[in-house]
Image: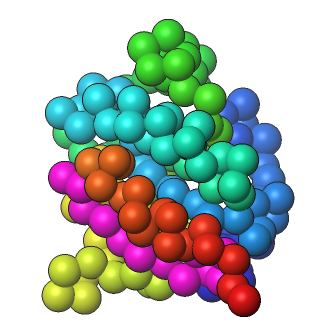
Amino acid sequence: MSDLYDVAVRTADGAETTLAGYRGKVLLIVNVASKCGFTPQYAGLEALHRRYGERGFAVLGFPCNQFGAQEPGDAAEIASFCSLTYDVSFPVFGKVDVNGADAAPVFRALKKAAPGVLGSEAVKWNFTKFLVGRDGEVTRFAPTTKPEELAGAIEAALVEPS
């Protein structure tokens, strides 16, 4: 999935950029929300980011308000919440839609590369996780999959090809 790194994304401060700086890394891309039943997963996501970061892994958070209006804040409120509540050090980008006509290009690409149950591309809820290997291969994990349950898949993705 080489085009994933070239799609436009917005940083939390509204600047347009791409994911090109993450090429060759293992990524866990997650649609996050601060008022969701799964919000405590921020702690697990941060633990993974810190545990594997030096080995070429990064968590990328994309706030989304499409599910139950569970991310109503603006960029400053989201950043404050992430920092003060979960000491988040991984990048949290600008708020996005993950479904529909206004879906962010990064999520369009991820959903196409890793459809959900029965081939559905729609993201079903907050904290859907997409693990992107160094080779660009994408695996989707449900919101109910706890971050710590991904350690084995992350370890396998971090293994350098021989």
Seen in the picture, residue 149 relative to 119 is either above or below; the reply is above
Q: Position of residue 44 (x, y in %)?
A: 38, 37
Task: Tell me the quarter of the image containing the N terminus.
Answer: bottom right
Magenta-tinted stretch: 133-145
Q: Is residue 41 left or right of residue 63?
A: left
Q: Residue at x 40, y 81 (%)?
A: 114
Query: Is residue 145 visible in this depiction of the protein?
Result: yes
Our reading of the magenta stretch's main secondary structure is loop
In this rendered view, identify the residue nearer to me: 49 or 22.
Answer: 49
Residue shown at 50% from the left, 73% from the top: 156
Of residues 44 and 2, which is closer to you in this image?
A: 44
Q: Residue at x 29, y 71 (%)?
A: 122
Instruction: Look at 34% across and 47% down and name the residue there.
Output: 148
Residue 51 position by quadrant: top right
Q: Is residue 24 left or right of residue 109?
A: right
Horizontal side of 137 relative to 124 (left or right) equals right
Q: How is the image coloured?
A: rainbow
Q: Is residue 143 magenta?
A: yes
> In this orientation, does residue 64 appear?
no
Q: Decide: is 32 above or below 26.
A: above
